[in-house]
Image (cartoon, grey):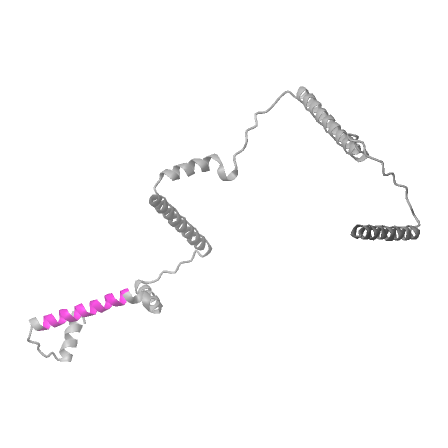
Amino acid sequence: GGVTKAVKNRNSKQIVAAKVKKERQKELTFKPKINDKYKPRKGRPRKFDRRIEQLHNEHRAKAKKRAALAKAKAEKEAKRYPFKPNIQKKPAPSEDVPARKKKSKNQTVPVEDRLMNHAAEKIKTRVRIKKMVEDEKMRQYPFHPEISLESRKKAMAKIDSSAPIYRRLGKLGKERDERIRKMRMKKQREEDTPFHPKINETSKALVENSRKGF
């Protein structure tokens, strides 16, 4: 009884599927004919593949032809102009022969000596430039008034006094030491000569005038 029931269910499903397929076929207007038995032949190249291969062969043939023409032209030019100049590759500007020699020579010199030489060259260059500037100023302003030694000292003292204090510390220290030294010497002389006679100012002036020739 169970087998008969299963067969009936399967048959009913097949009947329903057939009805649905039939209804769909009625709705479709275009029904192309399809050959279900068609099978593509193995080893037969397609039309697109043949076209690709054809284009590749044409391109290769054209390239080969151009290479042959270029070679023939070069051989013709060589026969026409047999002279071949000896062309040497020019070294790069940054690596020319003198620079390379100088570089190799500097590599044998110790670092300290190279730094000292470099500093000396910079000083020489600065001195040379300063002299050139001074010479140019001399040519532009040939007039040089004569300045007395006393005026020059006053001018230098004025410049020194206007300089910053940290630049005048050394000089101020020397001046202070000189004043202390003079005061000590004066005190020492006074201690060595305890007698100090009082001199009249008028007499002192007469003595000074007589020394000056009055």
Asked if residue 153 is among those painted magenta in the image, a careful observer would answer: no
Placement of the C terminus among the 4 image quadrants = bottom left
What secondary structure predominates along the stretch shown in magenta?
helix
Give residue 183's position: percent from left, percent from top: 16, 71
Which of 186/114 is in front?
Answer: 114
Residue 104's image quarter?
Answer: top left
Rendered view: 156 above or below 87: below
The structure residue drawn at horizontal position 14% and vertical position 76%, both measured from the top left corner, is 204
The reply to whether the magenta stretch includes residue 176 is yes
- Residue at (75%, 29%) from the top-left corner? 57
Q: Of residues 24 and 79, which is closer to you in this image?
A: 24
Number of residue marks:
0
Where residue 1 appears, as percent x and y from the top left, is 80, 52
Q: Nearer the viewer, residue 68 or 94?
A: 68
Which residue sits at x=30%, y=62%? Answer: 149
Magenta part of the chain: 170-190
Q: Quadrant of residue 196?
A: bottom left
